[in-house]
Image (cartoon, grey):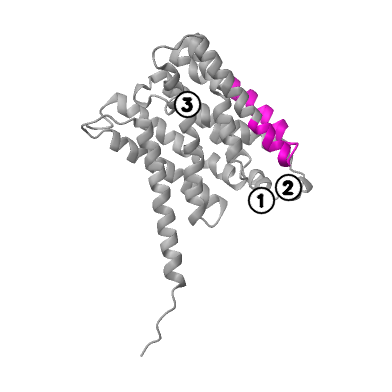
Amino acid sequence: MSLVDTPYLLRPLIMLLALGISAGAVGTLVNLRRAEFSAEAISHAVFPGIVVGFIVSGLDGIVPGGAVVGAAAAAVLTVVARRGGELEEAGTAIVLASFYAAGMVISLAHSDKSGQLEALMFGRLLELTGPRLTQGLVACAVALAVVWAAWPQQVAVAFDRAAARAAGIRVVRHDALLNAAVAATVVAGSAAVGVLLVVGFIVIPAAAARLVAGSPETMAALACAFGVAAGAVGMCVVAQPIARPVSPQACVVMVLLGGFVLVAALRGGARWITRQPTQPAR
């Protein structure tokens, strides 16, 4: 089955390729800042917006609803981050739990009887429509633009917040921009793989790229390439005829995990080989 000639496969492929690029760039900064927990919090925090958007406008309201709540969650997490230390972690956990619980309550209050709750949480990749694809691509473009517009400053903040502040960089402003980029990426991915699995696109490619990259720019390029390749390979696997149905979203995420394991194994093997003593020539 050809991906290009089949619309219900082509639309998810395009979305995954765009998501791979956006999440790779955003995930690089998330990894350098060790902000994976904040990214996880944002991915859960957009859930009530997605639920309300679905209730009001159906599937085409998922991205707009998630965008509104995602912006609010990003602002709240930016304020929480100013506390620092244990207070920051506690505040992030509160945001994660409270926003996600609100989404669950709203969803259950509207008598979900058709599996829509599961679809909002884990996505329905092959049911991606044209309008939702367009909305997702716009969200990916926004996330990418926000990251690259202030890339040098974001890298400086990631490596040394105090030095960045002393150099005149507005650290809180760049915290807010990064949170906004994460929220945009989560909203884009929620249209395809749901709010719970999209965090894998942000975390895994960047983690794999960091194992082999020598600079932030190289890391971002490798993370984007990793995300794009995983999306393409995952869709190729989904398109294969098999006896039992497999969740397309889970298949793509498993390809991401498999790729990370492969990169980690190759790096570990290379380091083991280089540490072996050479035999003297006779």
Q: CA distance from mark 3 to mark 2?
A: 33 Å
User: In the rendered structure, does residue 94 fall within the stretch colored magenta?
Assistant: no
Callout 1 secondary element: helix
Q: CA distance from mark 2 to mark 1?
A: 9 Å
Mark 1 neighbour class, 10 Å CA radius: few under 14, some 14 to 19, many 20 or more = few
Mark 3 neighbour class, 10 Å CA radius: few under 14, some 14 to 19, many 20 or more = many
The residue that label 2 is drawn on is 164
Residue in front for this viewpoint, 88 or 176: 88
User: In the rendered structure, does residue 91 fall within the stretch colored magenta?
Assistant: yes
Report x, y in % for residue 78.
Answer: 69, 32
- Using the image, determine if residue 174 lies above or below residue 216: above
Q: Is residue 169 left or right of residue 241?
A: right
Disc assigned to residue 190: 3
Tell me which numbered mark, 3 or 1, is placed earlier along the sequence. 1
Callout 3 secondary element: helix
- Residues shaded magenta: 68-93
What's the residue type where badge 3 is placed?
Answer: Ser
Of the 4 image quadrants, the one containing the N terminus is top left
